[in-house]
Amino acid sequence: MAVFSLFKLSMLLSLLSDVKLGSWPGILTQKEAVAVGGFPQQCNRIECPTYDVINSGEGYEIRVYNSSMWATTSPIDDISFVDGTRTGFLQLFNYIQGKNNYNEQIEMTAPVLTEIAPSDGPFCESSFLVSFYVPKKNQVDPPPATGISIQKWGPTYVAVRQFGGFIKDSDVGVEAAALSASLSGTTWLDAIKKSHSRDITTVYTVAQYNSPFEFDNRVNEIWFKFEM
């Protein structure tokens, strides 16, 4: 069963078009105190990509994601994570609602990813790629669509930090810095730095698991993808 009813999705689009809100999947922007850690419980309700945990420490977890397919927007340039994610999610919303070459509706999955290539300054535009995990049903032949690219992941190493609440722009850099600090002195941070040695600024990802209608026990993650 789809996570959102068509009515709720229509409501979401109406809200997003009329009011400046938090990023998908958050409408409110205040932080909430929730216990996070381990397997995202939302993945017991909707389909998520599969992974193995190979290491964990204070404030971080190292995962290896299995091969999978993702639908990804073109780069979105914006000064705001919230606005960039909203723009990308609306493109993906249209995609899963049937605006693709197969005119096929696709089940909602989690998480929605926003990959961030940070700007060089506080008032410069960063680049955002917003991605949707393609359900197993569609993995063999994901519907193509204008403006959406289908990306195949091989086995992918990810360093992860979880945090709760509705995400604000100011949260993203703070949580990314906290993940980097928690990895200090580990071979994982060395691998991350080596993998991103050609990046002008370190590229990282925000994963969001909840619908905008969930107010409790929200789970978000900062990801550093890397190679071993």
Image: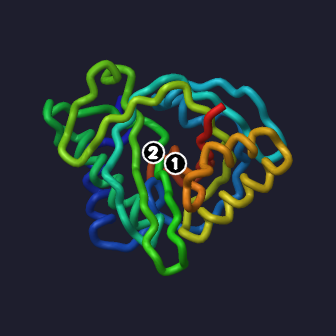
Image coordinates of residue 152 in percent, x first then y, are: 40, 29
Which quadrant does the N terminus fall into? top left
Its colouring scheme is rainbow
Report the residue at 30% width, 47% height from top.
Answer: 92
Of callouts 1 and 2, which one flags the residue occurring earlier in the amino acid sequence? 2
Image coordinates of residue 168 in percent, x first then y, are: 55, 67
Q: Is residue 125 above or below residue 136?
A: below
In-front residue for pair 177/171: 177
Report the residue at 71% width, 58% height from top.
Answer: 33
| Residue type for callout 1 | Gln
Q: Mark 1 sits on what residue?
A: 208
Image coordinates of residue 76 in percent, x first then y, are: 35, 60
Mark 2, other Cα within 10 Å: few <14 / some 14–19 / many ≥20: many
| Residue type for callout 2 | Val
In-front residue for pair 119/141: 119
Report the residue at 37% width, 66% height from top.
Answer: 77
Left or right for 14, reference 185: left
Q: Is residue 218 above or below residue 122?
A: above
Separation of marks 1 and 2 at Cα, in angstroms = 5 Å
SS under mark 1:
strand
Image coordinates of residue 220 in percent, x first then y, are: 59, 49
Q: Is residue 213 visible?
A: no
Q: Is residue 131 above or below residue 82?
A: above
Disc 1 to disc 2: CB gap under 8 Å? yes
Q: Mark 2 sits on what residue?
A: 112
